[in-house]
Amino acid sequence: MKKYLILAVFISQISFSHTQNKEALKQVLNTFMVSIVKSDSISFYGLFLEKSVNWVGIYKDKSQQKRWENDPKSDTFFTDNYKSFFRSVKGGNCEEKFDNIEIIEDGNLASINFDYTFWFKKKMLNWGKEFWHLIKIDGKWKITSVVFSMELTKYFPQPTLKERKKFDKL
């Protein structure tokens, strides 16, 4: 009986820890979104691992085809960094929104993937899928990589959440 009690306590501690981690990771997502809207560089920069963060965007095939019609030499992807991204959105006219969020974590390592939309002056410019990797350092989650796809809304509107979830199950 004592073994079962110890096992139950152990399992409840693990479950509590995972719940705390998921809540902290949701807060990272929220801080990211709010800091863009409020042009808060201190909060935004504090989300990232200072040393090295991969930041890669790739155009989805349909949007890239349209881009090639205008410029046959346009690249299909680009690399950047979180500081230059923030400088480009600073000013209060931009917003990034997330839904269809999935968080996977093991206590010190996490992956968050979600659907996003990017807005400028209340108009959606692009949408896609985004993946973050994070590590926990001194009790704080830090983003180590941001990789995302982009579909340009001037060519292709974002499907409904129901349609996107249906596609995710394939």
Image (spheres, rainbow, N blue to C red):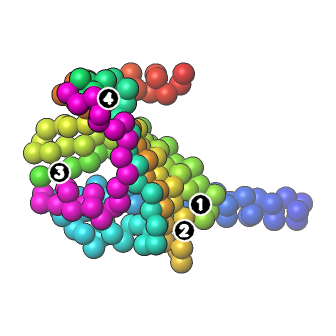
Tell me if mark 1 has few (under 14), some (14-19) or many (20+) residues whose alpha carbon lies within 10 angstroms of its own.
some
- Is the C terminus in the top left, top right, bottom left or bottom right quadrant? top right
Disc with the residue nearer the chain's start (3 vs 1): 3
Q: Nearer the viewer, mark 4 or mark 2?
A: 4
**How far apart are the two marked residues, 3 and 1, measured between alpha carbons?**
29 Å
The residue under label 4 is: 64
Q: Nearer the viewer, mark 4 or mark 1?
A: 4
**How far apart are the two marked residues, 4 and 1, measured between alpha carbons?**
33 Å
Quarter residue 88 falls in: bottom left
Q: Amino acid at mark 4?
A: Gln
**How far apart are the two marked residues, 3 and 4, measured between alpha carbons?**
23 Å
Front in this rendered view, residue 1 or 33: 33
- Is the N terminus in the top left, top right, bottom left or bottom right quadrant? bottom right
Task: Say whether residue 148 is left or right of residue 38.
Answer: right
Residue furthest bottom as drawn: 138
**How far apart are the two marked residues, 2 and 1, measured between alpha carbons?**
6 Å
Q: Amino acid at mark 1?
A: Leu
The residue under label 3 is: 94
Disc with the residue nearer the chain's start (4 vs 1): 4
- Looking at the picture, how far across and down is residue 130, in whole percent? 41, 43
* Circle 1 SS class: strand
- Looking at the picture, how far across and down is residue 118, in whole percent? 25, 43
Label pair 3/4, CB-CB below 8 angstroms:
no
| Magenta-drawn segment | 70-92
Tell me if mark 3 has few (under 14), some (14-19) or many (20+) residues whose alpha carbon lies within 10 angstroms of its own.
many
- Looking at the picture, how far across and down is residue 97, in whole percent? 28, 45
Determine the residue positioned at 67% across, 61% down: 14
What label does residue 136 carry, if any?
Answer: 2
Tell me if mark 2 has few (under 14), some (14-19) or many (20+) residues whose alpha carbon lies within 10 angstroms of its own.
some
What label does residue 109 carry, if any?
Answer: 1
